[in-house]
Amino acid sequence: MNSIFDQYISVYNGVTDNVGTYTLLGNFLGSKRHISRILDLRAETDENRKKAIKLSLPMATVSGWFSPSRKIEHLQRHSGFICLDIDGKDNPGRSVDEIRELLVSREDVAYAALSVGGKGMFALLPLAWPEKHIEHFEALKTEFLECYGLVLDKSCGDVTRLRALSYDPDAYINESAKRCECIEVFTPTLAAPSLTGINGDIRKVERCVSQLEEFGINITGSYEEWFNIGASLSALGEDGRYYFHRVSRIHPDYKYQEADKKFTNLLKNTKRVGLGTFFYWCQQYGITYKRQQQ
């Protein structure tokens, strides 16, 4: 089973590196190569020395992978996560243990750990709509202040923001974290076609899609599968768009605009492969349009 942290991010050799390379988010979070330097930083009393150690540590943009450089226009792929920083200096009187307990209690926190300096916490939340990164942050900033009395570092709204490698033997990991849905996103209402398709094709598709939705079965796990299912449903013409959206939105990364654009392109540019492909993939998951015998 894949980890939710199997997402590509950019990593940099210190703060002066603006080109970097890439790795999986989980690899960065779990790295133990610089534990001694991080512990030295936390024990250091000279502020200039602390800063020098921090700036020399590996850095990462945990919200995405950038190429060729760390600029917003060079974002190749969002990781799907937002990183929240709760610094001790911004929240006097609030202990690290208290903040940790609060973060762990949230169903949408996938990872929570000590910040590199050891006097604050950071948390990773999977986003329902990564393309609305800033909107998510603004909503979370308000929620944390009003509900918990905690101030979030305002720079967390920047997708390009660098995060220094940290270490926490008691880091909290929740692979089943729910996606943060702290904003409202308009999704157009889909108009259902008539269930009187030629040779009953639409009725057959409707039966299969209804079962996929009922059992929460995602048959579009890879791009290739998603593409082929869309190409198959395009055999229904515009009626297929409705079912392509319904099948696509079972996937946790579904985006209305992306799916709609893909189906339009499939209608225009793709050789029809027939509905048999769609029914084949349904059958792989035990779904059939045939009515069950009582």
Image (cartoon, rainbow, N blue to C red):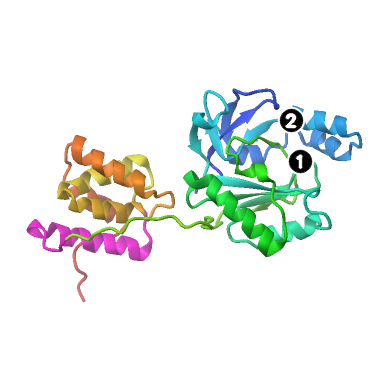
Q: Which residue bears the numbered disc 2?
A: 57
- SS at mark 2 in the image: loop
142 in magenta: no
What residue is drawn where x is 52% and y is 26%?
A: 67
Q: Are marks 2 and 1 in contact (CB under 8 Å)?
A: yes
Name of the residue lying farthest toward the right: 45
In front of the other: 71 or 138: 138
195 in magenta: yes
Classify 170 as above or below 36: below
Distance of mark 2 from mark 1, alpha carbons? Answer: 10 Å
Name the amino acid, label 1.
Answer: Val
Q: Please state the horizontal and vertical placement of residue 287, each as a whole percent of the image.
A: 27, 60
Residue 116 numbered tag: 1
* Range shown magenta: 194-218
In front of the other: 167 or 54: 54
Q: Is residue 155 left or right of residue 135?
A: right
